Image (cartoon, rainbow, N blue to C red):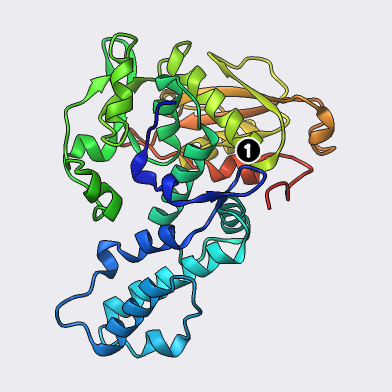
């Protein structure tokens, strides 16, 4: 079996009997080794003691007084965020359950970077055994912003950070260990170069064609189906559409902030201007394999999914919207 996304840390986790990811000391140590928590030469004794004891026992209880004793305000805040996030992970049995709890009950002060990392490693688990590079590249949309551009009539999505040539966040220890460069050349994923995805999966340097009616959007639909199945234990089929006419708009989910705005307008019966229409990247029809999995509000009717780019042509997908926005009965499937 081919491996991919080594930088997500999936090799540092365990699996429960249901195949979901369990937090380990090794995974927590990778978080503790993040650059934000790296000890400064001038770090006080309290911070050094906290760091040393946590590396020895990553799951031990940390008293508020231990963090409050750290002299540097920035370091103190970083440790507060890290310990709060660690405690959220340890409170639940699996990473999947922790993520569901975060997106349902409120992320609070959890950094968006940590949420993206959770999606990254959970998707690695969801897609374990997948040998379709187009699906894997499409899955990157769920945890990495994409910059879109029209090229010779095709809508191409490339990793926003890779295009910028620099990373907006410090490298994680795993990325540093793998020797992944900050910038890379971009190639559009096609059949001829698809086999190179495996060795490049942690570089995020392959673009994908998201033109309506083509392979990229279909692959993303399959990824979303697997995401819902794994996280909610609900079987759904997600079919890409090229247009929507004369449909009963019973329920919709915006897959990003711009798509939610567009969906609200359609729900209210407003006409979309050309700018809004041109921002739509993808439309999907979601149907439940078993209608009893949906609430009475939807019945056997489909759910429509909308994906759109922002005015600056950046796509920031929110995979949590699929978990919190669908009218499903079994909301507590993951434990």
Q: Residue at x 75, y 40 (%)?
A: 328
Q: Is residue 295 above or below residue 118?
A: above
Under tag 1, what secondary structure?
helix
Q: Position of residue 249 (x, y in %)?
A: 69, 27
Q: Position of residue 273 (x, y in %)?
A: 46, 27
Please state the total of marks drawn on the protein image.
1
Q: Residue at x 17, y 33 (%)?
A: 184
Q: Is residue 194 above or below residue 334?
A: above
Q: Residues within 10 Å of mark 1 (few under 14, many from 20)?
A: many
- The residue lying toward the viewer, choosing from 102 and 4, is 4
Q: Is residue 270 visible?
A: no
- The residue lying toward the viewer, choosing from 223 and 125, is 125
Q: Residue at x 35, y 81 (%)?
A: 50
Q: Would you say 16 lies left or right of 278 here?
A: right
Q: Would you say 320 lies left or right of 142 here?
A: right
Q: Position of residue 100 (x, y in %)?
A: 61, 52
Residue 225 placement: quadrant:
top right
- The residue lying toward the viewer, choosing from 295 and 66, is 66
Q: Is residue 330 visible?
A: yes
- The residue lying toward the viewer, choosing from 198 and 237, is 198
Q: Which residue is mark 1?
A: 230
Q: Residue at x 43, y 51 (%)?
A: 12
Residue 35 placement: quadrant:
bottom left
Q: Position of residue 44 (x, y in %)?
A: 23, 87
Q: Is residue 1 above or below residue 227?
A: above
The N terminus is located in which quarter?
top left
Q: Is residue 229 above or below residue 116?
A: above
């Amino acid at each position: 079996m081919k491996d991919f996304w080594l930088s997500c840390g999936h090799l540092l986790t365990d699996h429960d009997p249901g195949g979901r990811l369990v937090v380990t000391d090794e995974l927590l140590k990778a978080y503790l080794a993040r650059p934000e928590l790296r000890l400064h030469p001038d770090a006080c004794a309290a911070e050094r003691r906290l760091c040393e004891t946590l590396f020895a026992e990553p799951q031990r209880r940390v008293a508020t007084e231990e963090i409050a004793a750290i002299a540097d305000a920035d370091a103190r805040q970083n440790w507060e965020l890290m310990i709060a996030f660690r405690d959220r992970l340890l409170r639940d049995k699996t990473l999947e359950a922790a993520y569901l709890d975060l997106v349902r009950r409120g992320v609070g002060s959890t950094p968006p970077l940590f949420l993206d990392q959770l999606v990254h490693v959970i998707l690695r688990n969801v897609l374990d055994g997948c040998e379709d590079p187009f699906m894997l590249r499409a899955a990157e949309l769920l945890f990495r912003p994409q910059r879109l551009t029209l090229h010779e009539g095709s809508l191409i999505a490339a990793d926003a950070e890779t295009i910028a040539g620099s990373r907006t966040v410090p490298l994680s220890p795993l990325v540093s260990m793998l020797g992944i460069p900050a910038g890379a050349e971009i190639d559009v994923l096609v059949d001829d170069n698809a086999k190179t995805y495996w060795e490049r999966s942690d570089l995020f340097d392959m673009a994908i064609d998201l033109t309506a009616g083509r392979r990229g959007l279909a692959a993303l639909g399959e990824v979303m189906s697997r995401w819902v199945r794994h996280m909610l234990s609900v079987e759904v089929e997600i079919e890409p559409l090229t247009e929507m006419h004369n449909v009963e708009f019973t329920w919709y989910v915006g897959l990003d902030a711009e798509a939610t705005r567009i969906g609200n307008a359609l729900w209210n019966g407003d006409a979309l201007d050309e700018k809004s229409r041109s921002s739509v990247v993808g439309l999907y029809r979601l149907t439940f394999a078993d209608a009893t999995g949906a609430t009475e509000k939807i019945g056997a009717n489909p759910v429509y999914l909308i994906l759109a780019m922002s005015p600056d042509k950046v796509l920031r997908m929110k995979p949590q919207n699929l978990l919190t926005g669908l009218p499903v009965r079994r909301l507590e499937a993951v434990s």
